[in-house]
Image (cartoon, rainbow, N blue to C red):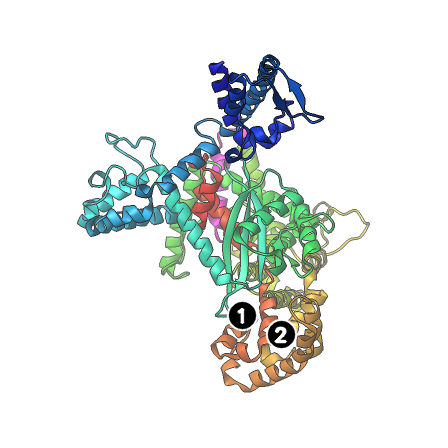
């Protein structure tokens, strides 16, 4: 009976913290007189058994219905019966408790270890620091600084940290250890406290320590960005791309105006998304915003490409964000739209499409093998030397560099123009390589292909299209380069687009004669026959059975020159329709060129109504007078005489303290500057990502990759 009492005592002790749940699952009910107050009302098994052992004649056992008087022997039977129920409950709770505790690596055990370390004062940071002498502290700082220097260098160069074999006998222990060893040899102060000279538990060379340091640097970098942003408004640029391990990564870049009035674009995060649906991307953005403590209500602009999951009118990412924040205006990437103009022209016009259908094979034949590529470079080098000796071209720093042919791509901005430029400049060398391939071809198919390409190249039709498209794309290329500037603002971009449209119209109306002379001069220099413009075009060349006979002049000027120029102009209007929207028409009134000649107070007031969260009704009434005063003040101030764009105006207002005087105007200018122009900053993130996470480092984790890109 004594063992029964001890078992019951042990069982009730385990059930102390689970008393409320047990009382509802067992039939064992005891009166309040048999409970231990120190246990919070849990039945006192020792007291109960004491009653039995003393053989009291009658014991009162409470039940839910009434108290029943029982003999001591019957009491013992009841106790044993109820003990069975208790043991079942104890077994069930034990299984659940063990499942909660888990294995040695579970969260429970880790939390227990952290708590024990916390309460152990001898392991606390203040205690350890207080026990460390000044010499040890100095050595630790030197060791940490040297480690940070090595990590910073490796991150800036995008190099791997670990080596394949990092043992002491290895000839190459990896970039981190080798660079730290090199550093220690050239700095005696560092060499005395790192690697073998450091304490065994404080060498800072473990991969986990390296990742912790990089993560700490990434956190501090992000905190500095958030500190610079403060409580100000911002916009985001988002795009996704696949890395070398076939994982979809989404990059987020934030755009804001700092306290100096400058446009800043910073990389915020790289997030792995399992799918590219708009809802999945929206959830990833919400996760980053919550982590960075950013509010979606402060978002004033969003920039993406033309993918349906991004700019969909109903279920795209743009629409999902606009549902929560109507002030987050969307702008399609201008650089991407410009590339779509080039691609649309190449596919919509049969003459241009046929021309680029020959350009790609020419690039392939001349550069598909190392032998042909080397021959092309050698011939081009000898031709350059000869031209320099004749004085046809001049030599200098950065001039006449070694070049090669580049295949045009639908996703590479400016690639079409670069391909045509190199094709025209390397024309004689390319002809020689094609002739060599035809004469010394390894097979008849390659020889016949090179002959056909050579015959096509030496036709006036091919040269005309090459020079024509080179001239047209050359007019667009400066706009493409300007749109890739990080501090580009939307008003300046719109002005550049308008300039390109005007240049195209001028070229259409008055550029034909000069262009035709340029084409004829190129043909004479390369011994290509120039057709008589008054002769009838052969039917096989025109490839159009409409029963009309036209001259070469009409064919080249009307059916090619006018049609292609009109097609580019039309595509520019289609893809850059934002320039005619209500929002951007009002923004154009803030253009500071020619002393605010386009200023229109009514339109600017209407622009303010598009941002209802940023201007109260009282401020809206004050803005009209403040805009008039601001324009008059700036026109008289000579310090603003050379201001030609909105970005410079913003910085000049901060320098002259006018942002404090005209606060509402400056707030409006900042809202305009926040609108993203192009997603080039996001594209640069992906370029760096592919450099950092290469085929040799395809097992990089998502957190490690994000930290490496952030720092």
Q: Residue furthest front?
A: 57
Tell me the crowding category of disc 1: few under 14, some 14 to 19, or many 20 or more residues within 10 angstroms, Cα based. many
Residue 175 locus on image (x, y percent): 32, 40
Say above or below: 457 vs 326. Answer: above
Q: Which mark is residue 647?
A: 1
Residue 428 locus on image (x, y percent): 48, 49
Label 1 secondary element: helix
- Front residue (pair 368, 569): 569
Q: Which mark is residue 439?
A: none
- Front residue (pair 471, 124): 124
Say above or below: 367 vs 514. Answer: above
Image point (57%, 65%), residue name = 489
Tell me the chief SS of the magenta region.
helix
**What stretch of residues is rendered in magenta?**
418-444
Image point (62%, 45%), residue name = 283
- Front residue (pair 458, 146): 146
In this figure, which residue is indicated by the disc labeled 2?
Answer: 590
Q: CA distance from mark 2 to mark 1?
A: 11 Å
């Amino acid at each position: 009976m004594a063992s029964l009492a001890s078992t019951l005592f042990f069982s009730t002790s385990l059930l102390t913290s689970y008393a409320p749940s047990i009382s509802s699952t067992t039939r064992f009910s005891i009166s309040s007189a048999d409970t231990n107050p120190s246990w919070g009302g849990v039945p006192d098994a020792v007291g109960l058994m004491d009653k039995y052992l003393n053989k009291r004649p009658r014991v009162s056992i409470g039940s839910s219905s009434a108290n029943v008087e029982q003999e001591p022997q019957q009491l013992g039977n009841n106790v044993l019966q109820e003990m069975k129920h208790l043991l079942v409950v104890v077994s069930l709770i034990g299984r659940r408790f063990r499942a909660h505790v888990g294995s040695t690596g579970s969260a429970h055990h880790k939390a227990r270890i952290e708590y024990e370390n916390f309460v152990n004062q001898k392991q606390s940071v203040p205690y350890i620091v207080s026990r460390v002498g000044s010499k040890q502290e100095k050595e630790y700082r030197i060791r940490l600084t040297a480690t940070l220097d090595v990590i910073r260098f490796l991150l800036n160069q995008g190099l791997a940290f670990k080596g394949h074999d990092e043992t002491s006998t290895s000839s190459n222990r990896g970039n981190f250890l080798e660079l730290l060893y090199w550093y220690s040899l050239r700095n005696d102060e560092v060499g005395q406290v790192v690697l073998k000279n450091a304490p065994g538990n404080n060498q800072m060379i473990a991969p986990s320590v390296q990742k912790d340091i990089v993560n700490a640097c990434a956190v501090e970098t992000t905190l500095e960005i958030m500190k610079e942003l403060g409580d100000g408004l911002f916009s985001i640029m988002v795009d996704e791309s696949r890395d070398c391990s076939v994982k979809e990564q989404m990059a987020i870049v934030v755009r804001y105006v700092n306290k100096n009035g400058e446009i800043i674009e910073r990389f915020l995060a790289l997030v792995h998304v399992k799918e590219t649906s708009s809802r999945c991307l929206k959830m990833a953005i919400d996760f980053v915003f919550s982590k960075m403590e950013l509010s979606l209500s402060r978002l004033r602009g969003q920039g993406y490409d033309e993918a349906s999951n991004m700019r969909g009118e109903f279920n795209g990412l743009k629409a999902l964000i606009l549902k929560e924040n109507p002030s987050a205006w969307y702008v399609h990437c201008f650089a991407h739209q410009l590339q779509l103009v080039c691609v649309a022209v190449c596919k919509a016009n049969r003459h241009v499409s046929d021309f680029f259908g020959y350009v790609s094979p020419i690039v392939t034949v001349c550069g598909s093998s190392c032998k042909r590529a080397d021959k092309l470079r050698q011939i081009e080098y000898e031709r350059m030397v000869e031209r320099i000796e004749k004085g046809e071209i001049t030599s200098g720093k950065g001039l006449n560099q070694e070049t090669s042919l580049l295949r045009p791509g639908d996703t590479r901005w400016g690639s079409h123009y670069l391909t045509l430029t190199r094709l025209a400049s390397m024309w004689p060398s390319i002809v020689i390589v094609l002739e060599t391939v035809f004469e010394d071809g390894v097979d008849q198919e390659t020889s016949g292909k090179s002959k056909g390409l050579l015959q096509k190249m030496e036709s006036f039709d091919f040269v005309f299209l090459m020079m024509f498209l080179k001239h047209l794309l050359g007019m667009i290329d400066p706009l493409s380069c300007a749109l890739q500037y990080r501090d580009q603002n939307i008003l300046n971009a719109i002005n550049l687009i308008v300039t390109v449209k005007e240049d195209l119209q001028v070229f259409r109306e008055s550029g034909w004669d000069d262009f035709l002379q340029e084409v004829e001069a190129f043909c004479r220099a390369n011994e290509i026959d120039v057709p008589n413009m008054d002769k009838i075009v052969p039917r096989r060349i025109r490839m159009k059975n409409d029963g009309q006979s036209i001259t070469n002049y009409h064919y080249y000027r009307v059916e090619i020159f006018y049609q292609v120029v009109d097609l580019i102009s039309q595509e520019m209007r289609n893809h850059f329709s934002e320039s005619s929207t209500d929002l951007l028409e009002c923004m154009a009134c803030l253009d500071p060129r020619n002393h605010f000649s386009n200023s229109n107070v009514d339109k600017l007031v209407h622009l303010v109504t598009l941002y209802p969260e940023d201007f109260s009704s009282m401020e809206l009434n004050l803005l009209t007078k403040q805009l008039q005063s601001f324009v008059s003040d700036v026109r008289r101030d000579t310090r603003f005489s050379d201001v030609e764009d909105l970005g410079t105006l913003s910085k000049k207002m901060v320098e002259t303290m006018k942002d404090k005087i005209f606060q509402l105007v400056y707030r409006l200018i900042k809202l305009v500057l926040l609108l993203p122009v192009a997603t080039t900053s996001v594209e640069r993130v992906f370029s760096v990502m592919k450099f950092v996470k290469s085929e040799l480092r395809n097992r990089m984790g998502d957190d490690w990759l994000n930290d490496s890109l952030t720092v």
